[in-house]
Amino acid sequence: MGKLTTIFKDTAIYGLSSIIGRFLNYLLVPLYTAQLSAASGGYGIITNIYAYVALAMVLLTFGMETTYFRFTNKTHTDSQTVYGTTLITVGSVSLVFAVLVLLLLSPVSQLMGYGDHPEYVGVMAVTVAIDAFLCIPFAHLRQQKKALKFAALKLLNIAVSILLNLIYFYFMDGKDVGYAFYINLVCTVMLAVCLITEYTGFRWRLDTQLLRTMLSYSWPILVLGIAGILNQTADKMLFPYIYEGSDMREQLGIYGACSKIAMIMAMITQAFRFAYEPIVFAGVKDKDQHEMYEKAMKYFIIFTLLAFLVVVAYLEVLKFIIGADYWVGLEVVPIVMAAEIMMGIYFNLSFWYKIIDKTIWGAIFSGIGCAVLLAVNIIFVPKYGYMACAWGGFAGYGVAMLVSYFVGQKYYPLNYPLKEISLYVVLACVLFGLMCATSDWPMIASLAFNTLLVVAFMAVIIWRDLPLASLPVVGRYFRKPNYKVKQ
């Protein structure tokens, strides 16, 4: 139980910084959607380019974050040598990437559809190269359990980004979408300076033999990562090529803006991953590890379902995050959130093949899910637009999750509490159905009713799975019949 407590503590730190950071970043969404109307296609450009950025980050880090955690905890390796080798490798690849894009800027920009604005592509290429390199110092902070420093730097980066965006887009009433990318570059350079102590003060050493071993471990993770990120971004990259309407960038902007509301799930999953991954690899031989996996899965699902219900319950309020001309796409929010929950479950399931060094399975599972997503998008986007994008992600993650579970139970069986998990899933689905059935009520009545449903779900969690019954005084209100508090 101690490790589970550590996960919750670190998740709280990472999660608080992530949630605060994402919330602050949400301030950019109303800012962008207010200054860049849906019809202008400006937010569509941001959505499209940042989809490419996400894919580039996976390619440039090529699984070396997870590989770093795995090898730094092996008894026969020197952690400093592992760190130095990882830094040099990722840094070299990132530098080559930035130079190549700048040398081939014109054809690359034309291919991406930005031949009239190649500077967008150039600036983001340099930014993503620096960001990819900085992923390793940030991984080092996590490995060293420096959660507070990690969180502080992330929040500083976001705060400066918001300040600069406010100055240009609000106070200067700017309309040039390119400034969003210039600001990103400035903040990334600032972050690199702040992290200087994480890649100085020790001897950088490239161990080529160690690197070969690390790459043999990391390449399936790279394939997994590519497939995984395509599950999140392929729709936004493919949309301009397969959508048949002349309002392509407008529709993509609507989908991208509404998807932002659903990103609470991405925050929770990311926070959980930051805390969970180092602990899993550090305690791989512990006897209670299986029990920890099983409980972590259960609580992850419970609290993501709660987050899902909260967002749906207050969607009529949360929609003001984005401009009114983007509200037409709000129906994608529950679908995207459900897909993110399945992505989080899939992440939890992924540790069995990482621990036994069979990461090729991850590549297979993610590849299958990606194939499903691509098929749904290619077949249905021309007719149904961005709604097909949302359902494509749902289908892709759902298939990857199920395949990973069934194969994992064969090679690394775990006794997940499926009955308890199923109870919460069914209850959440029923409450979601009730919220949808009353969506045409007056706003105040709908919010009040939805609040009661959320409170009911929380009461079930408290009654069944939180140890409030052991608390003095108030504990008696939460005790089940015949409940005995251990002394």
Image (tube, grey):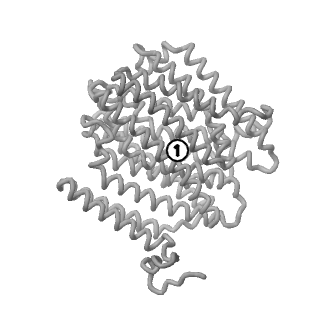
- Residue 240 in sight in this render: no
Q: 399 above or below 235?
A: below
Number of marks in picture: 1
Pointer 1: what residue?
Answer: 366
Quarter the C terminus occupies:
bottom right
Where disc 1 sits, the SS reads helix
Residue 76: x and y in percent read 82, 48
Give percent across and percent down for residue 338: 39, 51
**Quadrant location, the N terminus:** bottom right
The kind of residue on which mark 1 rests is: Ser
Residue at 60%, 18% in the rendered image:
99
Residue 217 located left or right of residue 11: right
Q: Residue at x 32, y 25 (%)?
A: 41
Hey, which quadrant is residue 413 in on the image?
Answer: bottom right
Please tell me how crowded label 1 is: few (under 14), some (14-19), or many (20+) other residues with Cα within 10 Å.
many
Q: Which of 114 and 245 is in front in this view?
A: 114
Residue in view at x 70 percent, y 57 percent: 284
Could you say where residue 354 lies in the image, as x and y percent from the top left? 64, 50
Which quadrant would residue 432 be assigned to in this image? bottom left
At x 63%, y 40%, the residue is 138
Q: Position of residue 379 (x, y in %)?
A: 34, 37
- Residue sitting farthest toward the bottom: 482
| Residue 84 seen in this snapshot | yes
Q: Is residue 150 above or below residue 188?
A: below
Residue 211 located left or right of residue 17: right
